Amino acid sequence: MMDPSTTIIRYRGHLNKEFKLWSTFSNDDSLIVSGSEDGDVYIWDLEDAKVQHVIKKHTGMVSCVSYHPTEMCMLTGSTDKSINLYYGSKVDVEKMLAGVNG
């Protein structure tokens, strides 16, 4: 049995030094999504831990993200007092993300 304190893989790139940030899996469990203290949303491939997309839509820290369990739908919440909704088919979301990479 594996020790629960053992790190299996690290997802790097986001800023998380001072505050608690929420992270989540995508609805198909292929991606990890997390907010960041730099105001961006980071999306990593689950298996290789490479950053797939960086969403630069908030001006404040992104403290929470939530992905719909079955739909291509994600919410992000920020200290800039905004909540952003990303919704569409997988193709629509990939097109949207292609335009927001940092």
Image (cartoon, rainbow, N blue to C red):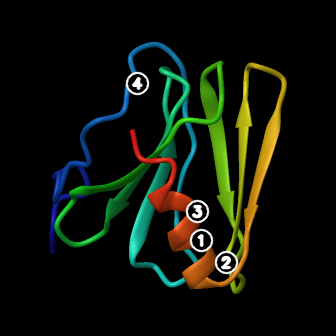
Residue bearing the label numbered 2: 72
* Quadrant in the rendering for residue 66: bottom right
Left or right of residue 61: residue 31: left
Residue 8 placement (x, y as % from top left): 16, 59
Residue bearing the label numbered 1: 93
Label 3: how many Cα within 10 Å (few below 14, some 14–19, many 20+): some
> Which one is in front in this view, the residue at disc 4 or the one at disc 2?
2
Residue bearing the label numbered 3: 96
* Quadrant in the rendering for residue 64: top right
Left or right of residue 88: residue 28: left
Secondary structure under tag 3 reads helix
Q: Amino acid at mark 4?
A: Asn
* Quadrant in the rendering for residue 87: bottom right
Q: What number of labels is visible?
A: 4
Residue depicted at x 82% and y 31%: 82
Q: Outermost residue, top direction?
A: 18
> Which one is in front in this view, the residue at disc 3 or the one at disc 4?
3
- Label 3 to label 2: alpha-carbon separation: 12 Å
The answer to whether the residue labelled 3 contacts the one labelled 1, judged by CB atoms less than 8 Å apart, is yes
Earlier along the polypeptide chain: callout 3 or callout 2?
Answer: 2
